[in-house]
Amino acid sequence: MKRIVIKVGSSVLIDDGNIANERMLNLVSLIVDLRKKHEVILVTSGAVAAGYTAVQLNKYVPTSKKVLASLGQPILMSSYKNLFDIFDITISQILMTEDDFNSRPHTEIFQEIIERIFKNDILAIVNENDISTTPEQLFGDNDQLSAHVTHYAGADMLVILSDIDGYYDSNPKDNPKAKLRKQVNELTQEELDQEFTPNSKFASGGIVTKLKAAQYIMENNLEMFLCNGFDLTSVRSYLLDNVHEKGTLFTSKK
């Protein structure tokens, strides 16, 4: 049995200004199937984007973003609860900041909570606490948060479900001949210093934050699988059938 952290991005959860119910149901079904073999933690983005489905505030104003997150968090958790209730799975919400991993007592509290949650067969759903925090306390994107959760929760693997199929040798938007890299064992400083290029107005980093998460994961001798969250075929075949068709595995193991 492995312990797996699944991180899902806003672009997967929100479609054309609404909660993407079918995609969320597919995600929930995947987690239900994974939990038959493994322990799973879900790290979810989407609170700000979900808030925007209710009230269209300008997310570039810092206070508006916090208001959107406060609106969206219950919308998001209500959607998850309704779907997990279908499968009789009890969920819990954990809101975290970077501070929780910078203090040993805070980190130990998180670790104790996670272990107690697993013992009671509860699914932990983690998100960043955007609302009552300063910018210095925040990771700023859930890719970094999910990497830290993976390490400190004693997980074996981080799976990032995104709006791309994996990590390419060049930008597939600019180069139609770009090739998907199925395995990456190391990242250069140049790759980690690229510009932030989120694909949606509610995403916070694009590929660069995923590469930084991958770097952290590999430095801690863990593995990360980056794949498409719109179509879960590749992640299902990789995690449930051990078949690697699409998606990129970041691992320090050669």
Image (cartoon, rainbow, N blue to C red):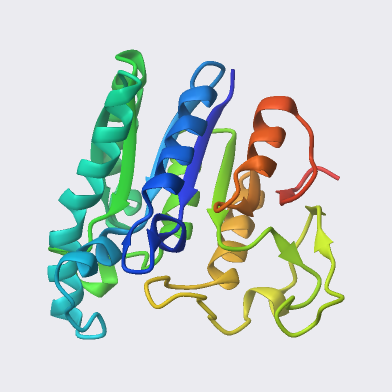
Q: Is 156 located above or below residue 200 in the figure?
A: above
| x 70%, y 75%: residue | 191
| x 46%, y 25%: residue | 32
Q: 202 or 207: nearer the eye? A: 202
Snapshot quadrant of residue 94: top left
Does residue 164 appear left or right of residue 64 in this picture?
right
| x 37%, y 64%: residue | 139
Q: Is 205 located above or below residue 183 in the figure?
A: below
The percent coordinates of residue 18 (x first, y second) are 31, 61
The percent coordinates of residue 188 (x first, y second) are 75, 71
Q: Quadrant of the C terminus?
A: top right
Q: 215 or 250: nearer the eye? A: 250
In this orientation, does residue 211 appear?
A: yes
The percent coordinates of residue 161 (x first, y second) are 55, 51
Q: Quadrant of the N terminus?
A: top right
The percent coordinates of residue 118 (x first, y second) are 36, 20
